[in-house]
Image: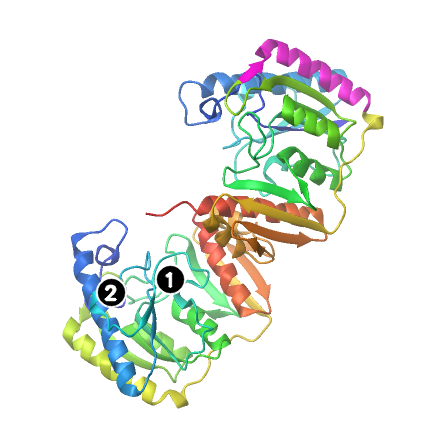
Amino acid sequence: MEGVAGVCSWQQVDARTPHPEYATFRRYYTQEVCSAIAGARAGGAAEVLVNDSHGPMRNLLLDDLPADVRIIFGNRKPFSMVQDADLGFGGAFFVGYHGGAGEADAVLCHTYTPSVIYEVRLNGVPCSEATINAALLGYHGVPLLLVTGDRATVEGVQAQMPWVHGVVVKESIGNFAADSTTPAAAQRAIHRGGEEAVREASAAQLYRFEPPITLDVQLVTAAQAHLVATIPGFERTGSRSVRFVHDSYPVVFKAFVATWRLGSQA
Amino acid sequence: MKVFISCDMEGTAGVCSWKQCDPSDAHEYPIFRRYMTLEVAAAIEGARSAGAARVLVNDSHWSMRNLLLDELPTDDDLRVISGAPKPWSMMQGLDAALDAAFFTGYHARAGECATLSHTYSDSLYSVTVNGTPCSEALLNAALAGTYGVPVVLVTGDRVIVDEAARALPWAIGVAVKDPIGYSAVNSLLPAAACDAIRDGAREALGRLDRAKPFAFDPPFELTVETTTVEQADFIELMPGFSRAGGRAVRFTASEYPAMLRAFLAASRMAAAAEPIA
């Protein structure tokens, strides 16, 4: 949701203590998803599964979506933002995405849990949510086709996955301001981008990490690392950092989810 | 001789309510943390009288900073571990350099008809190792056993003392109270409990030569039943855990410390699965 046109503040995307602005931006968010669905359909997609992947993961206004898609709704999914990636898809879209923790000029940059995750690397590669999620899709044979969000986010994804179509809906001005297209213009661009992305899906590649896969997570505080280091198989690599190595990416992905779930208890 | 004391609180004489054991309680907790401290001091005195030169106390309840430090002996050969979280929790500080372990203020496992019965976390419904239902005492005794350290004294309510007598027949048990269900007790007074604990500690070390390290047989198969499905969802995220039912997870290790560490991570992770609105 942070990468939706116009979004520049946590209050606009905070579903838990809803600010009046949330209701407005949840509508824009739903409309951008609708545009992506329509674009995918125009490009030839037969079936669409939407995974609501923001905050409590039940933000979409279901009435406003086309009636013939399926939706994953609700929180605490083991594979979180890429739940059910293994159901045999021809391609994936990341809509409303944002930059990774610490990224400059990326609106509301963070990686999963802002208060816990300072930096994530997989096999040494600095990762945003897009990277971490694309690798699970890649593991299941699903290429990432489209990313929408601010310029830093889109270009960050394209630097790692040059085949991905990007729709830049806004230019970040620091982390809490944006020079944005209007919702209607963003929706038109996402429709076009989605259509092209599906049409050119055959040119897309899979994004994967080669085993053994090393997950390095830098936590925000030493207390979090202290707690996370008690997860079986984890190694403390520094006062605020932990490492986990495994050959299977789904195991690594779940271990990463466990990291921020447990880390938030410190 | 060097003695390790893991001191919990629910098994202290007179304790029959969470309020008495809850560090955020302004009224009853300050009284009962003093009783806890006095029982630990009695155990130290008993150990000293039996020849223990050095004592290491690990505060093992809740925030793990309950003991009133200026009411403990003041010599240089007593050390106290305070605070939480600790990687080894109730057993932090125990290693092969210790000669014996005491468990004071201990309580019955989750599901027992006994005072404030639970196992590490309120979120856990049951814990078994190799099919044996485990209390904190048993889980912890097996870690001590890994390092060759026998548990020689268990104090607490009658149910945990009886369980210890079955699993650790060489240990001295001091039952300071009889549970009347979950939240009432028929108890010794604190002073009498301290006398019994002091005597028990002395006797326990007096027959140390008969004591044995307790151990389960490898491989160590841990099964944890949670109270909710979501707690099991969370635990299952962690490497090495598999699902054994809607509210059950399993973890197998060839080394007991690895299994216990996984158990402790599971109990912490279960606590993270608070219901969400």
For disc 1, the chain is A
For disc 2, the chain is A
Is A179 displayed left or right of B245 in the figure?
A: left
Quadrant where the N terminus of chain B is found in the figure: top right
Question: Hey, which residue is sitting farthest right in the picture?
Answer: B209
Q: What SS does tag 2 mark?
A: helix
Estimate the x, y position of residue A61 in percent, counting from the top left. 23, 63
Q: What SS does tag 1 mark?
A: loop
- Label whose residue precedes the other's in the sequence (2 or 1): 2
The reply to whether dot 2 and dot 1 touch (C-beta < 8 Å) is no
Residue type at numbered disc 2: Leu
Residue at image mark 2: A62
Where on the picture, by quarter, is residue A245? Answer: bottom right
Residue at image mark 1: A101
Does the rendering let one see residue A210?
yes
Decide: is A213 above or below B207: below
Q: Report the Cα–Cα distance between label 2 and label 1.
A: 30 Å
In this view, the residue in front, A18 or B110, is B110
Is A225 displayed left or right of B97 in the figure?
A: left
Decide: is A148 above or below B222: below
Q: Check disc 2: other Cα within 10 Å, few if <14, some if 14-19, many if 20+.
A: few
Helix, strand or loop: magenta stretch? helix
Estimate the x, y position of residue A228 in percent, counting from the top left. 52, 51
Does the rendering let one see residue B78?
no
Instruction: Residue at 46% x, 58% y: name it.
Output: A257
Decide: is B237 above or below B87: below
Front label number (2 vs 1) = 2
Instruction: Residue at 19% x, 52% y: name it.
Output: A19
Is A85 displayed left or right of A169 in the figure?
A: right
Instruction: Residue at 20% x, 68% y: name it.
Output: A64
Colour logic: rainbow
Residue bounds of the magenta highlight: B185-207
